[in-house]
Image: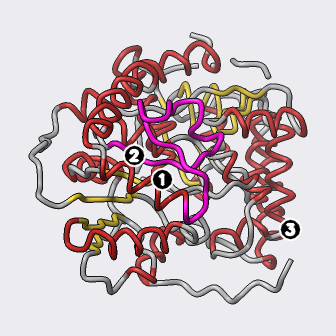
Amino acid sequence: MVLRKKQRTRIKLRQREQPTVSLRGYQKGRIDGYQKGREEGFQQGRTAVQVISNSAVAVLEPELPKLDLLVITAGIIPSLEIGVIQPFNELNKRENLQFEVKLEQEVSPEMIAAAGTIVFVRNVEPSAYALLELAHQLKKQSVYVIDDNFLEIQPTTPVGQYYCDPVRRETSIKFLKNAKTIKVDSPELGTYIHERFNKNVIYFPGSVDLEWLDRQSRSDTEEEQIVIGYAGGEKVEDFVPVIPALREILDYYGGFVRLEFFGYLPADLANHPSVNYVGGGMEYKQFLKRLNRCNWDIGIAPLADNLFNRGKTNNKFREYGACRIPAIYSNSPVYTPWVTQGVSGYLVEHNKKAWYEGIKAMIEDPPMRQRIKENAEMLVRQHFSLSTCVDSWKKYILKT
C-alpha cells in the first residue's frame, strides 16, 4: 500500500432478524447529522446538484477569496476535529494555510471553484458525491478522509441502519473508487480499500494536541478505591462479554472498586451502586480535558473482532496514553501494534473469562499499572503528537 500528503484557515463553525432500534434522548444530538434524507430525497438532491454542476464549470473567476483547502464534512463530530481541523489549524499557524470547513448542504459551486484541494470527510450522500464530480470537472484535487469501514457496519444501531441503506452504500463505494486520494487512520482499513477500490490510499494515524493537554490541570492523587473507567461512544455489542466480567469484579472486590462511564453506560450496569455515569455530547477538547482529570486506575477498551472494528483507529490507546491511564484492550489489530503486554498496556481475548482475569491482574499489580501509565504516555508522545500528524499531512497529501 502506498503511503503518501496542499496549505493555509478560516473555519465556519463543529443472520437473523434484527430487532427494532430505538433512540435514547442523549443519542439524538450525535445522530442528528446523519439523519439527512430518505430515499425520496436522493433523486431530488442528484437533480439539483447536477444543475449546479452543469453551470459551475463555466465559473472561471470566482468572486470568493482563494482557499488552499475546502473541507466538506458529513457532520461535526470528534473525528473531524482530531483528524482534520486540529492539524489544519496548526498548518494555518505555521504556514498560513487557508481553509474553510463546510457541511455538505452549505457548499456552493463558487466555494469549490475558489479552493485548490477539496477534502471530503465521511461523506456517503449522493448529493455530496455530486460535489466530488463537480470538483473533478473543475480540475481540483480531491481527498476522501474516512476512519470507519461503512461497508462492513451492521444494521443493529441507528447509525448502522443509516450506513446500510443501499443508496448510501453505493455512494460510499463511488467515493472510495473515484476520489484522487483516500486518507485513513488505520492500516487495516487502508489495506481493505487498497485491495478492493483504490490504489492511492494513504495511512497515518491521528494525533493528540499534547501541548494543549499539558496546559490543563491534572491530579495524580491516589484514592482508596480502584477506579475502572470507560470513555467513548455507545458500543453495545463490544461490551457483551465485558459486562458480566465487570459484575464479577464488583462482586469480588465489593466497595474497593468503582466503575465510571463517560459518554456511554451499559444498561445492565445502570443501577449498580458502584457505577457512576457522566453523559457525553461535549466539544472534543472539553471531553479530553475531563478525561485528563479522571485519574482512573484502569481504563478499558473493548472491541469485538469483526471487519468493521478491524478498520477502526487506535483512538482509545492515544487518549488513554496521553491522559496517563493504564488500560486493558481487546486483542485486536487496532491495538496489538502498540501494546506490549504488561509494558504499554494489557491485551485480553474478547471473552468474559479473559476480561475478568485481565482486570483482576491489573487491580492486583500496582507496579504494572504504573509501568503501563509511563510507557503508554511515552509512546503517544513519540508517535501521535500534533506535530507528527501535521508533518504527515504535508509530506504525503499536501506535498508542501
Looking at the image, is 346 positioned above or below residue 208? Answer: below
Residue 228 lies in the magenta-colored region: no
Query: What percent of the width, then of the height, locates residue 29?
Result: 45, 72
Give yes or no for contact between labels 3 and 1 (Cβ–Cβ under 8 Å): no
Location of the C terminus by quadrant is top right
**Contact? badges 2 and 1 (CB < 8 Å):** yes
- Quadrant of res 352: bottom right
The magenta region covers 326-353
Q: Determine which residue is flagged by label 3.
A: 166
Instruction: Indicate which disc residue 327 carries.
Output: 2
- Say whether disc 2 or disc 1 marks the residue closer to the N-terminus: 1
At numbered mark 1, what does the secondary structure look like: helix, strand or loop?
strand
Q: Which residue is mark 1?
A: 301
Q: CA distance from mark 2 to mark 3?
A: 38 Å
Specify the amino acid type for callout 3: Pro
- Position of residue 273 in the picture relative to residue 39 (left or right): left
Q: Amino acid at mark 2?
A: Ala
Mark 1, Cα crowd under 10 Å, few <14 / some 14-19 / many 20+, is many
**Foreground: 257 or 44?**
257
Residue at x 88%, y 38% (from the top left corner): 197
Q: Is residue 193 left or right of residue 68?
A: right
181 or 60: nearer the viewer: 181
Q: Which residue is the extreme one toward the right?
A: 196
